[in-house]
């Protein structure tokens, strides 16, 4: 497909009617799902719990005319790259997951990916469970799932403004169709969802350092200590983007007595000197109940990397 034809498809999507799904209601808890990616790995909803998910249910051909390519889906794949990924570059808490209906074949999806040089993961709904749980049909549907797992369906078209219509009419002498493909609303909903700090993470207890060690001895646990300064961005990243994640809470709360200390306050300043901590680097300490350092993590890291270091130190 050449660039001119792709532009035409993006500009004039109205030739294919949209069927609105009634299966899910905005604000409802998203159903569990798993999707087979093109490299045969599995993307499960349980693995991305606490992240914001943009789930795009797409199709390669029209259901009523299986020999005709679905121009809207092709256009949306390109817009995912231009209007979503370009707007949130490097956003670790955003999962973008286009999923094609089970009627699509793996090889044709690979050809689409390679043709348009798409670098993001693409899934195939082999058993049809994703479409049936989220939409109840084989039409195009776009969903944003927030950190709490609540779902919102977002439109994939935007109406032209009167100004756009007039400008197009004056330059071409033709009338614009009612709308064009757009992920502007999806991007807005994603941005709002990312701004919400997730809940259900690590339960940092209001204890002194001595009290934490005593409780660890009593409960036969180790002590997890977060040492931070409130004005340093990497410290805030850990506090707001890593320690708040449910997967971090589920792992750490059951195993450790968790405490945190501001290194500019009295208790934290003592720990800063005792363990020779830098004020310009967040530090996580995993201690034996006697205060011996078992593991030290310096700097910020995504939740999976941070947890892997903690788990590796205790051979789990």
Image (cartoon, rainbow, N blue to C red):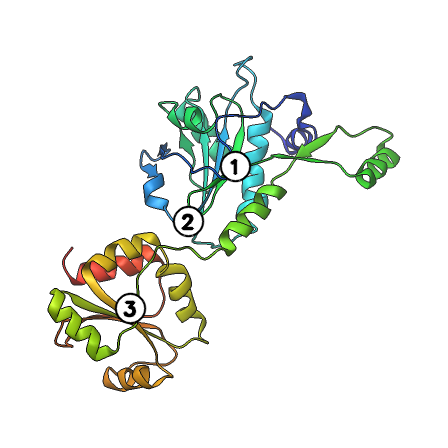
Which label lies toward us, 1 or 2?
1
Marks 3/1: CA–CA distance: 35 Å
Is residue 117 among the parts visible in the rendering? no
Task: Give SS at disc 2.
Answer: loop
Q: Look at 44% across and 22% down and name the residue there.
A: 104
Q: Quadrant of residue 158?
A: top right
Is residue 184 among the parts visible in the rendering? yes
Marks 1/2: CA–CA distance: 18 Å
Task: Give SS at disc 1.
Answer: loop
* Residue 274 on image: x %, y %: 23, 85
**Which sits in the foreground, 234 or 257?**
257
**How dense is the environment of label 3, judged by Cα within 10 Å: few (below 14), some, or many (20 and up)?**
few
Q: Which residue is mark 2?
A: 51
Q: Look at 34% across and 61% down and name the residue there.
A: 243
For marks 3 and 1 on the same chain, the one whose residue lies earlier in the sequence: 1
**78 in relation to 201, above or below:** above
Which label lies toward us, 2 or 3?
3
Verify CB contact (< 8 Å) between mark 3 and mark 1.
no
Task: Give SS at disc 3.
Answer: loop
For marks 2 and 3 on the same chain, the one whose residue lies earlier in the sequence: 2
**Which sits in the foreground, 160 or 136?**
136
Q: Look at 35% across and 23% down and name the residue there.
A: 127
**How dense is the environment of label 2, judged by Cα within 10 Å: few (below 14), some, or many (20 and up)?**
many
Q: Which residue is mark 3?
A: 205
Quadrant the N terminus occupies = top right
Q: Look at 51% across and 56% down and name the residue there.
A: 195
Q: Which residue is mark 1?
A: 26
Q: Is residue 28 left or right of residue 211?
A: right
């Amino acid at each position: 497909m050449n660039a001119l034809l792709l532009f035409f498809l993006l500009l004039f999507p109205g030739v294919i009617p949209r069927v609105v799904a009634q299966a899910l209601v905005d604000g409802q808890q998203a159903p569990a799902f798993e999707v087979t990616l093109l490299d045969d790995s599995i993307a499960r909803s349980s693995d991305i719990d606490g992240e914001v998910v943009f789930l795009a249910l797409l199709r390669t051909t029209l259901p009523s005319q299986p020999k005709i390519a679905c121009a809207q889906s092709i256009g949306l794949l390109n817009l995912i790259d231009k209007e979503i990924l370009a707007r949130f570059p490097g956003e670790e808490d955003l999962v973008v997951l286009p999923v094609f209906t089970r009627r699509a074949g793996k090889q044709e999806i690979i050809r689409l990916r390679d043709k348009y040089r798409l670098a993001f993961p693409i899934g195939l709904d082999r058993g049809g469970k994703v479409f049936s749980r989220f939409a109840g049909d084989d039409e195009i549907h776009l969903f944003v799932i927030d950190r709490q797992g609540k779902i919102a369906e977002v439109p994939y078209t935007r109406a032209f403004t009167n100004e756009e219509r007039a400008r197009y009419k004056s330059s071409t002498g033709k009338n614009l169709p009612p709308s064009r493909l757009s992920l502007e609303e999806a991007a807005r909903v994603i941005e709002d969802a990312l701004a919400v700090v997730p809940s259900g993470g690590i339960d940092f207890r209001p204890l002194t350092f001595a009290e934490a060690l005593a409780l660890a001895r009593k409960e036969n646990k180790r002590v997890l200590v977060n040492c931070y300064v409130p004005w340093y961005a990497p410290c805030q990243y850990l506090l707001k983007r890593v320690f708040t994640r449910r997967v971090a809470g589920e792992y750490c709360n059951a195993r450790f007595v968790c405490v945190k200390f501001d290194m500019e306050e009295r208790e934290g300043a003592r720990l800063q000197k005792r363990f020779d901590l830098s004020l310009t680097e967040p530090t996580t300490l995993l201690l034996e109940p006697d205060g011996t350092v078992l593991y030290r993590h310096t700097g910020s890291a995504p939740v999976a990397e941070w947890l892997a270091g903690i788990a590796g130190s205790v051979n789990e």
